[in-house]
Image: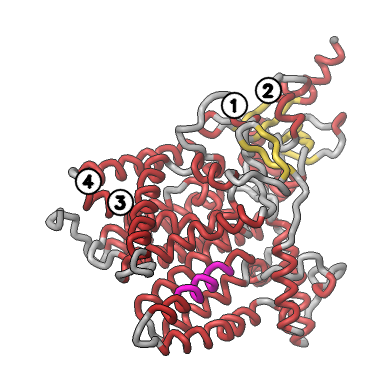
Amino acid sequence: MKNISVPRFKGWYAPLFFLLFLLVGLFILDDYGISWDESIQRRHGRVSIDYAAKKLGVEHTPLEPEWDLEDYQWQNYGMLYSITGNLLELGLGYEDDPYQHYKVRHYVCFLLFWIALIFFYRSIRLRFPERAWYPLIGTLALILSPRIFAHAFFNPKDHILLVFYLINTYTLLRLLKHRNWSSLVLHALATGLALNTRLPALIVPLTTFLILGWELLRTRPFPRKNLAFMAAYLPLSVLFLVPFFPYLWEDTLSRLVGAFSEMSAFNWDSYVWLFGDRISALDVPAYYIPAWILITTPLVYLLFIFTGLYATVAATMRNLRRVQLWKTEEQLLDFTQLGLAVGPILVVIILGSTLYNGWRHLHFVFPSFIFLMMVGFDFARRSWKRPVLVTGLLAAGLLMTAVQMVRYHPHQYVYFNFAITGEPLIIRFDMDYWGVGFRDAFLKLAEQVPEGETRSVKCEVWPCKDNYYALPPAAKEKLRLEGAWHRADYLMTNFIWPNTRFDLRDRKEHFAYPALELRPAGQLTIGVYDLNQARENQEKE
């Protein structure tokens, strides 16, 4: 098995790979709509800028004069991304142009993901330095993860956490491999930035302390450098955290403790859907996150992920017989990624945390699973009798997923793998719960309206309005929003309310008169219904 031939990758292959993906991403970026939280995150940033300007003594016309960060409901959330987006918007003069200022945020979202992919590539290189094609395949697999790919363009919260968690993971692996002070400082910087996103980023510093602490207990001679690293790491991380978190500029320690305690106790009293069950977000079953990961990850990926989990856990169990967790540098990196992938899921299950629609709030663990997928792929190539078939199987999985993503475009965020079949998904699962597809629906509806005419649209949820305001001018001229049902020509909905799902299934009332229905890969996500026809039919009856 040691003589298995692999392709030789020259130094320019990786830069070409990333350049091509950058060009593809920039080309399709404007296809994606506005998600539910984008306007909220924009306001967060504006309130933070007002606060920072006041504290720094900068002359500044308040962006949100009715809000003060001292009393703001979301004061305890890191605002690095939101502040950046607003500063770019103001610098470019797009404050009063929703089409442009949302596009700026999508550029920032995507470019952050693109940068994070470079760090992911380097993470796999740390693990497989002699196999230059492994990092490219692993990075391609992460790109060809449909839900992760789509959220990279519009998700202003969970995606930003994924980006900085991924970078922070790389700096941890680099520290564990090189054990020098430059790696420690870089890791502390990445930790400070990651903690500026959301609370779950705490799993990285926790993992850092557990690994260094375990080595203090088990390694002889005594690793004094570990002790020095542990003493310096947390203060440096806080030092890098505070400048990008304006609310912490005063009374830092107590506000930091308050931020973590409030964020960990957050409740969302609503409902989520899984396998046709309507579940309280405050009391989701233990299988909720694992189930979502299983049904929205390509099946071939799952095969190699489970193989990587098996290989890593098996090695750990063998080492435990000698009261060790790892024996080699490679096993240490694998064990670390295992903890970073599985740890947050276990914490959520054990604490009974409030969970939102789908598993977007835990997308940040997925790069670690793809890392383990490559561990499983390598294990399979070395252990199975026909390594060429193993390579062919993964290649086929990547190709099939790419084809599916093209079919779904630009709605890859509602991707399900081939294990999910049967009755319509819209009545069994949360689909386009963030309303990102409203943009595509508006554009297609505008194409149906003759030049010089205008149609009115009633939005069932307010993200529909955000997508309207952010339309290109040509499409916006043909449509207008109407608040009253009896005056609107069309109703636009993403079916998030229980009654709409079942009325749609039975084609009751206006649902019997579709003017436009978005069906990525054949599955309904957004509907536009002709209210004039519905009223005419009702009058006849």
* Closer to us: 32 or 226: 226
Residue 207 included in the magenta stretch of the image? yes
In the picture of the structure, the residue carrying the numbered disc 1 is 424
In the picture of the structure, the residue carrying the numbered disc 2 is 505
From the viewer's perspective, is residue 218 above or below residue 486? Answer: below
In the picture provided, is 119 more to the left or to the right than 290?
left
- Indicate the position of residue 257 as horizontal and vertical percent values: 71, 76
* Closer to us: 451 or 321: 321
Magenta residues span: 202-211
Instruction: Choose mark 4 or mark 2, whichever is in front.
Output: 4
Instruction: Choose mark 1 or mark 3, whichever is in front.
Output: 3
Nearer the N terminus, badge 4 or badge 2? 4
Q: CA distance from mark 4 to mark 1?
A: 39 Å
The amino acid type, in three-letter code, at marker 1 is Pro
In the picture of the structure, the residue carrying the numbered disc 3 is 377
Q: CA distance from mark 1 to mark 3?
A: 34 Å
Nearer the N terminus, badge 4 or badge 1? 4
* Secondary element type, mark 4: loop
Q: Residue at x 27, y 54 (%)?
A: 378
From the viewer's perspective, is residue 78 above or below residue 98? Answer: below
Instruction: Choose mark 3 or mark 4, whichever is in front.
Output: 4
Nearer the N terminus, badge 1 or badge 3? 3
Nearer the N terminus, badge 3 or badge 2? 3
Q: Residue at x 47, y 52 (%)?
A: 27
Nearer the N terminus, badge 1 or badge 2? 1
Q: Quadrant of residue 512?
A: top right
In the picture of the structure, the residue carrying the numbered disc 4 is 384
Residue 15 seen by the camera: no
Q: Quadrant of the C terminus?
A: top right
